[in-house]
Amino acid sequence: MQLLLVIFLVGAICGCVAVLLQTQTTISFDLTEVTEISFQQSLWRAGQFYVLCILCASSLLGVVLIPILFFIRGYILCCTAGLMIGSQIPNATLLSWIICGLPAVFQLPGLFILAQSCIYGSIFLISKAIGSAKPIVNINHKLALLVSIVSFTLTTFANYYLIPLFIAELQ
């Protein structure tokens, strides 16, 4: 879990550096993309990294792919937030926290717990492939799945209801 956190933070730092190295261009955001979101789009935005994590776990390469996924998640999160803060829209910092930070607060704990369970599952697949199919760590996969489902539900709620509500209040 600590390695995933470090990889996520390295991705976040790279995202911040990428924004800082960006030339001074005017960036405009269309807030209707965020406020007029359907429930299906909200489900996909909330669940895409969960789905990718589970797909990575079903492979022998999951041990390598899941940390890469966390690097990408940290990079995308900080790059998007940094670009919003650097834009010319009013209340850019607050909007950045609402659009990027609020879903991340709900999504990341469940994603980290699910990823740990998925990495152990991938390690089990590797051990089974080489002939010693013993569980490596006694981890409660049901609890990890339950926490991930709650986290996914809260993230969907934030994307579908809270973000449009807060943005409407700011405008």
Image: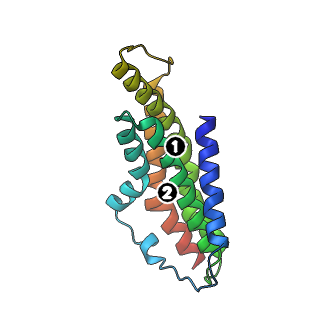
Q: Which residue lies furthest to the front in this view?
A: 130
From this view, report whether residue 41 is shown above or below residue 1.
below
To which quarter of the image does residue 141 belong?
Answer: top left
Q: In this view, does 155 lie above or below 167?
A: above
Distance between mark 2 and mark 1 Cα atoms: 25 Å
Secondary element at image label 1? helix
Residue located 60% across and 75% down the image: 170
| Residue type beneath disc 1 | Pro
Q: How packed is label 2: few (under 14 Cα within 10 Å), some, or many (20 or more)?
A: many
> Can you give x and y, in whole percent of width and height, for residue 110 in the image?
51, 40
Q: Residues within 10 Å of mark 1 (few under 14, many from 20)?
A: many
Q: Residue 158 carries which label?
A: 2
Report the residue at 53% width, 74% height from top: 168
| Apparent side of residue 106 relative to residue 46 in the rendered image (left or right) | right
Q: Which label sits on residue 170?
A: none
Mark 2: amino acid: Ala
Q: Position of residue 137 (x, y in %)?
A: 51, 18
Q: Nearer the viewer, mark 2 or mark 1?
A: 1
Q: Closer to the N terminus: mark 2 or mark 1?
A: 1
x and y, in percent, of residue 100 in the image: 56, 62
